[in-house]
Image (tube, helix red, strand yellow):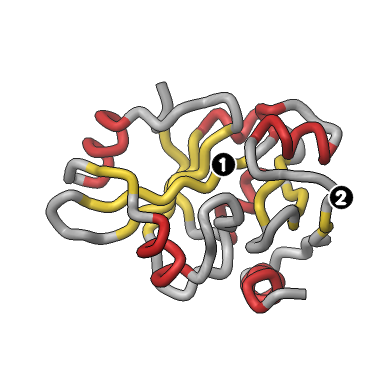
Amino acid sequence: MSKSVERVRQAARSAGLDIEIRQMPDSTHTAEDAAIQCGVTVGQIVKSLVFQGSTSGKLYLFLISGPRRLDPAKAAALIGEELHRADPKFVRKQTGFAIGGVSPLGHQIEIDAYADETLMQYDVVWAAAGGVNFVFPCEPRALAKAAKARIADITG
C-alpha cells in the first residue's frame, strides 16, 4: 500500500474515524467512474477539490458531492478572497496527494476545509483514500468532522 494511502488510514484513526479502505479494480478518477465502482449514486461520491487563494496563496479544500460544482462566488465570500484552481504539481508537493486521489484526510499540511451541505443528505458517502482507485465509505458528518471541514453552502 502506498505511503499516501497509509497516511489517510493513520489520519482517520487519529481522528477517531474507523474506515475500511478499498482498492477498486477499475478507474475511480471521475465521480461517475467512482460511483460505478462503488455501486452508489454519483451524489454519494465526494470530490476533494483544492483551490488556492489568489491573494494569500493559501490552499483550501472543498468537499463536494459528485454532480455538483463549486460556486466560486460563494466560496470566495466564505473565505474572504478570490480563488483559482491550484496547480497540480503544487497540490502534490504541499498535500502529498496527486489530483484524482486527493483525500479529505491525511494532508501533509494543515488545510482549511469546507464540506458542501448537500453531502449531508446521504447515509454514506465515498471519498478518495490517497491513491489511484483507493476509496473509503463514511457517514458524511463524521467525515466532515474528521477532516475539520466546515459544512456550508458552497455549490451552485
- What residue is rendered at 50% in x and 69% in y? 107
Question: Residue tagged by mark 2?
Answer: 25
Residue 14 figure quarter: bottom right
Q: How crowded is mark 2: few (under 14 residues within 10 Å), some or many (20 or more)?
A: few
Q: Which amino acid does label 1 sit on?
A: Lys
Please give the name of the residue rendered at 58% of the width and 50% of the height, measured from the top-left corner: 100
Q: Name the residue under label 1.
A: 47
Which residue is located at x 51 percent, y 44 percent?
A: 63
Q: Which of marks 1 and 2 is in front?
A: 2
In the rendered structure, which disc, 1 or 2, sits on the residue that comes first in sequence?
2
Please tell me whether residue 113 is drawn above or below residue 121 in the rendered image: below
Badge 1: few (under 14), some or many (20 or more) residues near its Cα, within 10 Å?
Answer: many
List the single residue furthest toward the left. 55
Q: Which disc, if any, is residue 105?
A: none
Q: In which quarter of the image is the C terminus?
A: top left
Question: What is the x, y in percent for residue 36?
Answer: 81, 32
Relative depth, front residue between 36 and 59: 36
